[in-house]
């Protein structure tokens, strides 16, 4: 077929629009998935801010993996020094065992400990924590704050100091301070 023939141009045009249609359909499918996840997250958590629920869902967090989202501060502290040490991973693993995460949440957390998540994960968690903390009474706030900060501190102390315990790096301290601020402390 001649490279300038109308039939060839018509075929190329059809291929182009078919490819474009497939991309648009996939983008629509992804948007719909995120919207459905955001609705499920809002229902599960009581989040009334649709933008926050959407932001959480856009981080590939679903209603099924939301429990892993609770452990974001531990992951953020562990990555604060640009790598996760074996002792830090052990502390995170202990927290995972105590939390009773299902398999999909464990897999998501495993991904976060193998591949450093973007800073938007902790930023979104901080927004979520700010909303959550306002919905709790003072006793519940204190319990949640103490538990999260205690676990984050344990991760920070796991890699530093003498024999791997006791010292907290400036970057880990800054991350813990950000978490503390998000929890109203």
Image (cartoon, helix red, strand yellow):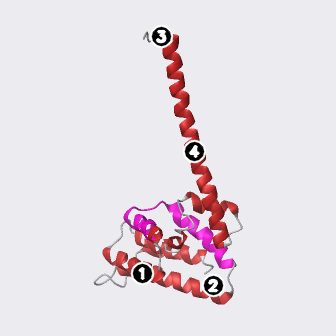
Q: Position of residue 1 (x, y in %)?
A: 42, 11
Looking at marks 3 and 4 on the same chain, the residue that comes earlier in the sequence is marked by 3
Find residue 4 and name its label. Answer: 3
Give me the residue at 31% from left, 75% from top. 86
Mark 4, residue position? 27
Q: Secondary structure at mark 4?
A: helix
Label 4 to label 2: alpha-carbon separation: 39 Å
- Percent position of residue 74, x then y: 46, 75
Mark 2 falls on what kind of element? helix
Label 3 neighbour load within 10 Å: few <14, some 14-19, many 20+: few
The C terminus - image quarter: bottom right
Distance between the Cα atoms at labels 1 and 4? 36 Å
Q: Is residue 128 magenta?
A: yes
The quadrant holding residue 87 is bottom left
Residue drawn at 69 percent across, 61 percent down: 50
Q: What residue is rendered at 41% in x and 64% in y?
A: 111
Q: Nearer the viewer, residue 137 or 40?
A: 40
- In this view, the residue farthest toward the left is 163
Residue of label 2:
141
**Which numbered tag is attached to residue 97?**
1
- Left or right of 107? Residue 147 is right
Q: Residue at x 54, y 39 (%)?
A: 23
Q: Bounds of the magenta span?
A: 106-134
Q: Earlier in the sequence, mark 1 or mark 4?
A: 4
Marks 4/2 in contact by CB < 8 Å: the verdict is no
SS at mark 3 in the image:
loop
Pick whichever, 33 or 56, lies toward us.
33
The answer to whether 98 is drawn above or below residue 59 in the figure is below
Q: Position of residue 173 (x, y in %)?
A: 47, 76
Is 130 in the magenta?
yes
């Amino acid at each position: 077929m001649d490279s300038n023939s109308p039939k060839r141009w018509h075929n190329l045009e059809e291929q182009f629009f078919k490819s474009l249609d497939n991309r648009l359909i996939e983008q629509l499918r992804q948007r719909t998935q995120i919207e459905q996840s955001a609705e499920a997250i809002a229902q599960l958590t009581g989040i009334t801010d649709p933008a926050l629920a959407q932001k959480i869902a856009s981080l590939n967090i679903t209603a099924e993996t939301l429990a892993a989202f609770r452990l974001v501060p531990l992951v953020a502290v562990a990555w604060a020094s640009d790598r996760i040490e074996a002792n830090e991973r052990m502390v995170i693993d202990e927290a995972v065992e105590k939390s009773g995460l299902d398999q999909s949440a464990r897999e998501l957390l495993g991904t976060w400990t193998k591949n450093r998540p973007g800073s938007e994960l902790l930023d979104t968690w901080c927004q979520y924590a700010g909303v959550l903390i306002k919905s709790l009474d003072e006793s519940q706030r204190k319990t949640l704050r103490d538990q999260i900060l205690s676990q984050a501190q344990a991760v920070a102390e796991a890699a530093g100091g003498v024999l791997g315990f006791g010292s907290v790096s400036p970057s880990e301290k800054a991350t813990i301070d950000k978490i503390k601020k998000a929890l109203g402390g």
